[in-house]
Image: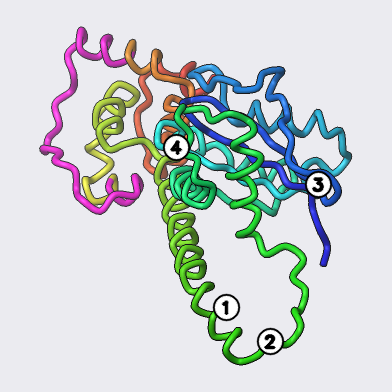
């Protein structure tokens, strides 16, 4: 079976670390933008990390020859929303996203050693956690010699928990991907707050059920008809807040506006923000 180099990104405590493995070399740490644990902030993203990884590998086909595994904790979930388009751009088609906690807990049970810090030491990661991850990948399966019936039955009993764990991880991966799709859209609260700051009377053209569909939400928003125009002072405050949003949130809202099919009256002072001449 064809093999590929492994790269694992650990998204822990709002930082990211990288470990690598090849068919001939065991796990080792790779620096991320010159640091063991690179901080993820409002001004840094996983796209920067992936670009750095691609540049360091210096391969003409980008990350096409790699398997990439991202282990995340809740505080870094939002960063994952930008990853999928970047992976496609870099040619990486073999990847998965997994929660950190189940793998950490399983490695602790098997090794009898639990990490005591948010950022575990390298030797615990390379000797205990990463081998557990690798055992789930089913790399290079080879047909084993025939075993007696009793031994096969024992093997089946031992494998059952692993199969159940695999199904759980696959279900978690599906849920994560669904969350990532949802995260690429602005929240309903942002839309109701900021659309009137971008357009004049937006809810005259966009009905509540249409807004719910466009925002990927099941519940209809509470929008009165007619929706009053904000006062001059309120409008200025909303537009100031809008311009101060984090870059990722601002871009999601901007992209949502660009894709609106309705004929809306864009406020002149927001043309530059939306990228229109």
Q: CA distance from mark 3 to mark 1?
A: 29 Å
User: Are dots 2 and 1 in contact, CB under 8 Å?
Assistant: yes
Q: Position of residue 123 (x, y in %)?
A: 64, 33
Q: CA distance from mark 3 to mark 2?
A: 31 Å
| Secondary-structure class at tag 1 | helix
Residue 143 position in % (x across, y down): 76, 79
SS for callout 3 = loop
Marks 4 and 2, how far apart at CA: 41 Å
Q: Given this view, does label 3 or label 1 mark the residue nearer the observer?
A: 1
Q: Spatial distance from mark 2 to mark 1, Cα to Cα?
A: 10 Å
Residue at image mark 3: 22
- Density class for disc 1 (Cα within 10 Å; few <14, some 14-19, many ≥20) is few
In the rendered structure, which disc, 3 or 1, sits on the residue that comes first in sequence?
A: 3
Q: Nearer the viewer, mark 3 or mark 2?
A: 2
State the residue position of label 4: 73
The CA span between labels 4 and 3 is 26 Å
The picture places residue 52, in percent across and down from the top left corner, at: 73, 27
Q: Split into 4 quadrants, where in the image is the C terminus?
A: top right
> Magenta region: which residues?
212-239
* Tag 1 residue: 155
Q: Which residue is mark 2?
A: 147
Q: Return the mark for residue 27.
A: none
Q: Earlier in the sequence, mark 2 or mark 1?
A: 2
Q: Of tags 4 and 2, which is closer to the observer?
A: 2
Q: CA distance from mark 1 to mark 4?
A: 33 Å
Give above or below for 171 relative to 154. Answer: above
Nearer the N terminus, badge 4 or badge 3? 3
Relative placement, left or right, of 160 versus 155 is left
What element does badge 2 sit on? loop
Q: Is residue 89 left or right of residue 271?
A: right
Residue 142 on the magenta segment: no
Q: Quadrant of the rendered structure where residue 25 is?
A: top right
């Amino acid at each position: 079976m064809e093999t590929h180099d492994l790269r694992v990104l650990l998204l822990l405590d709002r930082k990211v670390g990288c470990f690598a493995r090849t068919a001939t070399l065991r796990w080792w740490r790779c620096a991320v933008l010159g640091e063991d644990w690179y901080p993820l902030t409002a001004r840094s993203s996983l796209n920067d990390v992936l670009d750095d990884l691609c540049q360091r590998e210096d391969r003409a086909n980008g990350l096409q020859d790699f398997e990439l595994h991202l282990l995340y904790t809740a505080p870094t979930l939002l960063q994952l929303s930008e990853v999928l388009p970047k992976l496609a751009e870099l040619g990486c088609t073999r990847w998965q996203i997994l929660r950190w906690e189940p793998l950490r807990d399983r490695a602790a049970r098997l090794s009898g050693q639990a990490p005591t810090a948010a950022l575990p030491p390298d030797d615990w990661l390379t000797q205990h956690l990463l081998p557990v991850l690798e055992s789930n990948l089913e790399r290079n399966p080879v047909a084993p010699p025939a075993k007696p019936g009793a031994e096969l039955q024992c093997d089946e009993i031992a494998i059952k928990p692993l199969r159940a764990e695999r199904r759980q991880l696959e279900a978690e991966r599906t849920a994560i991907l669904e969350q990532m799709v949802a995260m690429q859209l602005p929240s309903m609260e942002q839309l109701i707050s900021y659309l009137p700051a971008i357009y004049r009377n937006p809810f005259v053209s966009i009905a509540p059920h249409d807004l719910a569909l466009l925002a990927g939400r099941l519940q209809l928003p509470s929008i009165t008809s007619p929706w009053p125009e904000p006062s001059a002072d309120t409008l200025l405050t909303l537009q100031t807040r809008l311009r101060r949003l984090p870059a990722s949130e601002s871009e999601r809202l901007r992209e949502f506006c660009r894709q609106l099919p309705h004929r809306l009256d864009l406020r002149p002072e927001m043309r530059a923000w939306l990228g229109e001449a």
